[in-house]
Image: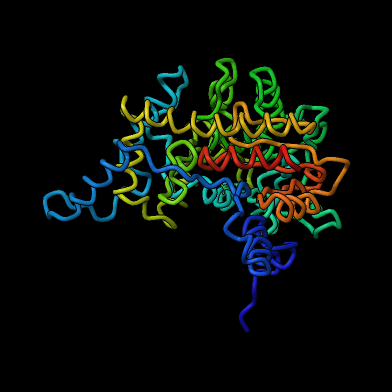
Amino acid sequence: MARINDHFLKLQAGYLFPEIGRRVAAYAAEHPDEAKDIIRCGIGDVTEPLPQVAIEAMHRAVDDQARRETFHGYGPEQGYEWLREAIAEVSYKQRGVQVEADEIYVSDGAKCDTGNILDIFGHENAIAVPDPVYPVYVDTNVMNGNTGAARKDGSYEGLLYMPCTPGNNFVPEPPEQHADLVYLCFPNNPTGAVATREQLEKWVAYAREHKAILLYDGAYEAFITEPDIPTSIFALPGARECAIEFRSFSKQGGFTGTRCGYIVIPKELTAKDAAGHDVPVSRLWARRHTTKFNGASYIVQRGAAALFTPEGQVQTRALIDYYLTNAALLSEACRSAGLNVWGGKNAPYVWVQTPDGMGSWDFFDRMLREAHVVITPGAGFGAHGEGFFRISSFNSRENAEEVARRIGKL
Ligand code: MLT
């Protein structure tokens, strides 16, 4: 008899964003006259067209596929060298960070990578996650059998939760307890918090002392506007021996629907096998990647590579600035309404305390019913997200301005 993976049964609810989508669809079905008025600031999905350089590069790549001489079949699983070289040069070396092209693995996005990375780690690891947190880190650990049962507040036995609160400005200190794998995400999803160099130094020191690995999600690094904030964990001395970095073109290049991301695993990074020997982590990831993945599409990789040309850099900056202006507008609207606000400065997400101690999902309902605006309830990101909500700035300027007006009227 076929058996399921019972760990899936521990998962508490559907994945957060489809759940929000379900609630919004139900409301729209009950109130068809209001449906067209609803503005979605829930999931962080981009709305603006791709940078023109990417469009043109992908058109050319489609034409390549039309001629035998320029046709591309299976590409290298790790990604085309011209893309990995461009990433290493522009995203790292030009910023004084040592990352080589052969340490980069191109994929179809950071969500898949942050979930798939667990394939190469054992089940004995002590795992630390921030709370609130991007749900993928927690749910994939549940699916992999790395946790116990769910608790009433939605957290899971067996994970070490690191509370992120106004008290620590939503940047957790390294814990007293030991952890082997630590998820960090800066600029943070959902709180929009960024970590200073000093804070990241403490994390690198913790990882080195505990022989832990930092799983560093830098999907939103392009939104960092303050020059002193590190854009990569590898900007910190000693991080090459204790970190993996996840990056994405989704938000930086508007690729949510085009799909491309990458992961950086330095050659120095090792972890122990059962006999206590050091094994290069990149060797395992390369093995996993070549077995389970056939490479991101040639056309998409051509589009991604175009973002690293000088023209592409200008167009990408303009796209990011567009969303950051939305974030500033939305933050200001919430502040003017007397709400406590974080994020929105070096990040596309604005993190807001609900008024009068309202529950996150209650406030979600209120925003939907009274303002016809979809936000993300903080509780969906973890127990410490209760009492907060997230507004995504990924929207047209017109919609962001309208949401700001509606917040003012609430
Ligand atoms: C979010 O809204 O948190 C993101 O869009 C989710 C993701 O990038 O997968």
Q: Is residue 394 above or below residue 31?
A: above
Query: Which residue: 79% across, 57% down?
Result: 148
Q: Is residue 40 visible?
A: yes
Quick check: 262 left or right of 125?
left
Quick check: 312 left or right of 319?
left
Q: Is residue 380 visible?
A: no
Q: Is residue 4 above or below residue 22?
A: below
Tell me the quarter of the picture where residue 132 sits: top right
Query: Which residue: 61% across, 61% down?
Result: 35
**Residue 100's x, y, as percent?**
40, 28
Q: Is residue 18 above or below residue 284?
A: below
Query: Which residue: 13% across, 54% down?
Result: 67
**Residue 40's x, y, as percent?**
60, 50
Query: Which residue: 59% across, 15% down?
Result: 228
Q: How many marks?
A: 0
Q: Quadrant of the N terminus?
A: bottom right
**Residue 173's x, y, as percent?**
77, 28
Viewer-proximal residue, 28 or 272? Answer: 28
**Residue 106's x, y, as percent?**
41, 43
What colouring style does the render use?
A: rainbow
Viewer-proximal residue, 72 or 40? Answer: 40
Q: Quadrant of the C terminus?
A: top right
